[in-house]
Amino acid sequence: MISISTEAQAHFVKLLANQESGTNIRVFVVNPGTSTAECGVSYCPPDAVEPTDMRLPFDGFDAVVDEESAPYLEEAEIDYVTDQMGSQLTLKAPNAKARKVADDAPLVERINYMIESEINPQLANHGGKVVLLEVTEEGYVILQFGGGCNGCSMVDVTLKEGIEKQMLDQFAGEIKGVRDATEHTAGEHSYY
C-alpha cells in the first residue's frame, strides 16, 4: 500500500524518539476522492489508534492508516530527500483524488479515474478542469471544460494535442476520439 524509503524511515525513527513511548505515524487523506484531496503525515499516540485503523509495520515504527483513507493511499510513496536547498519529506499519493479502479472496470470509470488522477492535476496548474459528460455509442469521449479552460484560446490545443492523445493512447481500441461540449463563446469566461 504505502512504501516508505529507508531515508524516510530513519527520519521518522529520529522524530519519534522525542515522542511518547509507543507513538507511531499516521498517514491520511483529507477530502479523499475529491479534487481538493490533501495527504498528510502526523504523530499517532497509542491512544489515538482506532480499532478499524490499518497498521503497516516499518523499521522501528508503524504507519497507521484510517479506513477511509486506505483505498486512496494505494501506491503512495514517502521519501526523505536532501538537496542543495536542504532536506524535506515528500509524500506522493497518485490515487488521493480518485480511488484507483481495476483494469477491467467499465470504460467510463477508467476514463473518470484518468481525468481525476492525470488530466485535472495538469489543468489545475492553469486554473482549469474538465469533466466527462458521456462516452457516445460511436466511441467519442465528450468533455466539458471549466475554470480557466472555459473560453481559453488554447483549449483546442489542450484538447487535441494533450487530452485526446493521452486518451487514445491509454484507451486504444476502445475510443475513437475526444470532443469538447463546452460553450466557449457564451457566459462568463476567464480570458474574454
Image (cartoon, rainbow, N blue to C red):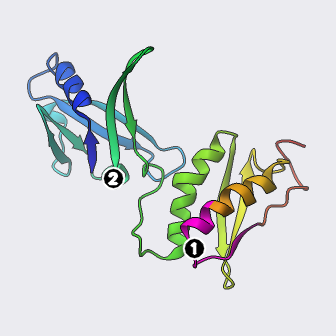
Choose top left, top right, bottom left or bottom right for residue 183: bottom right
Residue that appears at 51% across and 61% down: 113
Q: Secondary structure at mark 2?
A: loop
- Type of the residue with mark 2: Glu
Residue 3 among magenta residues: no
Whether the residues at callouts 1 and 2 have beta carbons within 8 Å, the answer is: no
Q: Report x, y in % for residue 176.
A: 67, 76
In the picture as drawn, the residue positioned furthest to the left comes out as 21
Residue 37 screen position, x and y as percent = 47, 44
Looking at the rendered image, the quarter that the C terminus falls into is top right
Of residue 50 and residue 34, the one placed in the foreground of this image is: 34
40 lies above or below 134? above
Name the residue that disc number 1 marks: 172
Q: Nearer the viewer, residue 146 or 20?
A: 146
Q: Disc 1 or 2, which lies upstream in sequence?
A: 2
Q: Is residue 43 left or right of residue 98?
A: left
Q: Residue at x 39, y 69 (%)?
A: 102
Q: Which amino acid type is shown beneath numbered disc 1?
A: Ala
Measured in 3D between alpha carbons, the distance from the residue under mark 1 to the one under mark 2, in whole angstroms, is 25 Å
Residue drawn at (16%, 45%) of the image: 55
Give the crowd class for mark 1: few <14, some 14-19, many >=20 residues within 10 Å.
Answer: few
- Regarding mark 1 in the picture, which secondary structure is present there? loop
**Res 74 label:** 2
Task: Identify the magenta region.
Answer: 166-179
Give the quadrant of residue 141.
bottom right
- Is 121 positioned to the left or the right of 158 in the image? left
x then y, percent, for residue 111 = 55, 66
Relative side of 61 to 35, left or right:
left
Whether residue 63 sits left or right of residue 37 in the image: it is left
Across and down, in percent, residue 100 comes to: 41, 60
Against 189, is 162 above or below?
below
